[in-house]
Image (tube, rainbow, N blue to C red):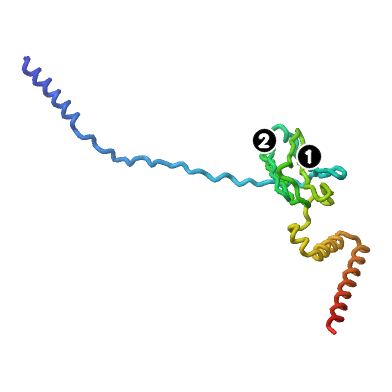
Amino acid sequence: ATQPRVIAHLTQLRDAWQARLAPVPASSAAPAPVRLGVSASPPKVEFTPITSFGWDQDPYPSKWVSVYITSGVDGVGDDPSKVTCTFAKDSFDLRIQNLRGKDYRLFRNLEKDIDPSQSKYIVKKNRITVKLRKVDGEYGPDHWANFTAKRPRKEEGAASADPSASLMELMKDLYDEGDDNMRKTIGESMMKARLGTGAAGMEGDF
């Protein structure tokens, strides 16, 4: 009776050992593909232009031009970090991001130069004030007749090199902005100047 039990036990040990040595069959299923993360490009920000604002300057010799934005910015002071403003010598760029779900921008080319390093902006609860520091001229800060430049500005050297061109631009501005009497006066002056130049040229030819 002992021998059959021994044989059965040895048989079980052999089967177990062979099972351990048997190769594991390869899985027929292909490994799942690994998805690599693709960084999405940031969404393009579309700004709503700020068209309602005011500006002023103190009486001469004021060193500052102030810009006031009060319309449509209620609650902007709750998170001043949403407001940024960059300054260049002849422009400024104010941006408000995610104010009640919208982005706003006020960009202007200025009539005269400013000092970017001293210019600043102040954010209050329901308003933004931009302080533009004027550049001192020969006799102190200039008075600004207009806030923005009406046409692309020229460098001072180019303007001084041709004084007649600057005079013609000034007369054109007066003609465009003046009333009928002003336009008539300027038109007659320009006609007389042209006739006078032509007559002088004719005399020189003879």
Res 161 → quadrant: bottom right
- Depth check: give the residue in front, 173 or 19: 173
- Would residue 71 be visible to someone looking at this image? no
Tell me how many marks there are: 2
Q: Is residue 54 above or below residue 163?
A: above
Q: Is residue 102 left or right of residue 33?
A: right
SS state under label 2: helix
Mark 1 against mark 2, which lies toward the viewer?
A: 2
| Quadrant of the drawing holding the N terminus | top left
Instruction: Report the residue marked by disc 1.
Output: 70
Residue at horizontal 75 percent and vertical 47 percent from the top? 114
| Labelled disc at residue 81 | 2
Element at badge 1? loop
Q: Quadrant of residue 168?
A: bottom right
State which quadrant residue 99 falls in.
Answer: top right
Residue 166 in picture, x, y percent from top left: 81, 62
For the residue carrying disc 2, how many other residues have a C-alpha within 10 Å: few (<14), some (14-19), or many (20+)? few
